């Protein structure tokens, strides 16, 4: 089965103007405004989460406003806004604005469809983007597993270990919440698998095989991959390619683990890969 990410890459390549540059910043600003609303006007705040019944009664703004609900109205919620802005802006630089915008839209649509499905089944539920941002955190941990953050503002912890805690929280919610509300973490995880499943599978350890290689078949496969390749060089930070920017210079960083390509703007301005 082909990696869905290849189809997403092709879509972004064929539609270079697709996407909202700085989307992570706009989401953070809107979430900050919503956080203030939650402090000063709880009645207005209650009109923002997604509710299929409310949308069907004309409150269509909930289809978008639910994405601006922060983790809470305490200072912890305000800190989470900055944390997810940092994660989102980093992914946006790494993927490009088109792919990051598509990631947000896909997760929004999946969550909205889930809410309407529950409404059809007779369940009433208000949805916030909590699990969407959790899934975004998983995506960050896949591409930047050794990046360190200060857990509880004190303890330095690598992202991959926080991802394990996040996964444990997902499992806890699945096994403790009543059906069908316990399926929301699984639904939120679908978007993550669509965009990052291939990357996860590529990092799994592979057992060496002693089978004889069919050189004719392998050479045909390599020719197909070369024919379908859309570019030769792609910057690991901003996502620009030599196809889109033929006059841009690309270099490989000798201090990064593995082979990682960077454009001339980021070869001396990037976080070095350690794995």
Image (cartoon, helix red, strand yellow):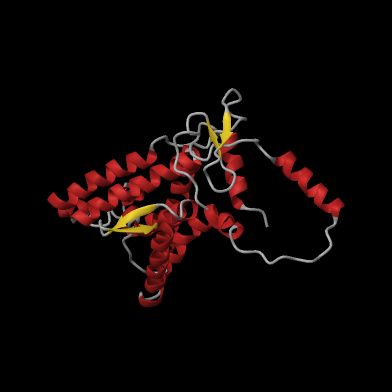
Q: Is residue 21 left or right of residue 190?
A: left
Which of these two is toward me, 141 or 133? 141
Q: Is residue 10 visible?
A: yes
Where 36 sits versus 239, above or below?
below
Would you identify the image quadrant in which residue 170 lies? bottom left
**Which residue of the protein is positioned furthest toward the left in this rendering?**
40
Residue 106 screen position, x and y as percent: 48, 50
43 over 29 or under it: above or below: below
Q: Using the rendered view, name the quadrant where residue 74 is placed.
A: bottom left
**Residue at x 47% of width, y 61% of height:** 189
Name the residue: 29% across, 47% down: 82
- Residue 154: x percent and y percent? 25, 58
Question: In front here: 32 or 96?
Answer: 96
* 248 or 1, nearer to the observer: 248
Left or right: residue 206 versus residue 217 is left
The N terminus, quarter of image = bottom right
Please give left or right for residue 119 compared with residue 195 in the image: left
**The one of 196 and 147 positioned closer to us in this rendering:** 147
Residue 104 x/y as whole percent: 43, 48
Looking at the picture, how far across and down is residue 225, in whole percent?
Answer: 73, 44
At 52% from the left and 42% from the top, the residue drawn is 255
Any part of residue 50 in sight: no
């Amino acid at each position: 089965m082909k990696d869905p990410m290849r189809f997403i890459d092709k879509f972004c390549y064929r539609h270079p103007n697709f996407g909202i540059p700085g989307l992570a910043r706009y989401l953070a600003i809107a979430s900050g405004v919503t956080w203030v609303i939650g402090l000063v006007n709880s009645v207005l705040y209650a009109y923002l989460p997604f509710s299929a019944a409310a949308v069907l009664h004309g409150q269509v703004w909930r289809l978008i406003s639910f994405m601006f609900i922060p983790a809470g109205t305490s200072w912890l919620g305000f800190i989470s806004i900055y944390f997810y802005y940092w994660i989102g802006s980093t992914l946006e630089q790494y993927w490009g604005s088109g792919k990051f915008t598509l990631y947000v839209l896909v997760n929004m649509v999946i969550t909205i469809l889930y809410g309407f499905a529950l409404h059809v089944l007779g369940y009433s539920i208000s949805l916030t983007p909590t699990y969407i941002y959790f899934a975004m955190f998983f995506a960050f941990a896949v591409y930047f597993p050794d990046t360190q953050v200060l857990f509880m503002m004190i303890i330095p912890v690598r992202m991959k270990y926080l991802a394990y805690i996040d996964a444990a929280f997902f499992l806890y919610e699945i096994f403790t919440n009543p059906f069908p509300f316990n399926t929301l973490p699984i639904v939120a995880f679908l978007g993550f698998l669509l965009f990052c499943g291939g990357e996860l599978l590529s990092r799994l350890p592979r057992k060496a095989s002693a089978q004889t290689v069919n050189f004719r078949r392998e050479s045909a496969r390599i020719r197909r991959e070369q024919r379908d390749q859309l570019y030769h060089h792609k910057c690991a930070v901003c996502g620009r390619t030599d196809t889109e920017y033929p006059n841009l210079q690309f270099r490989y960083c000798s201090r990064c683990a593995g082979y990682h390509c960077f454009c001339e703007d980021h070869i001396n301005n990037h976080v070095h890969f350690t794995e």
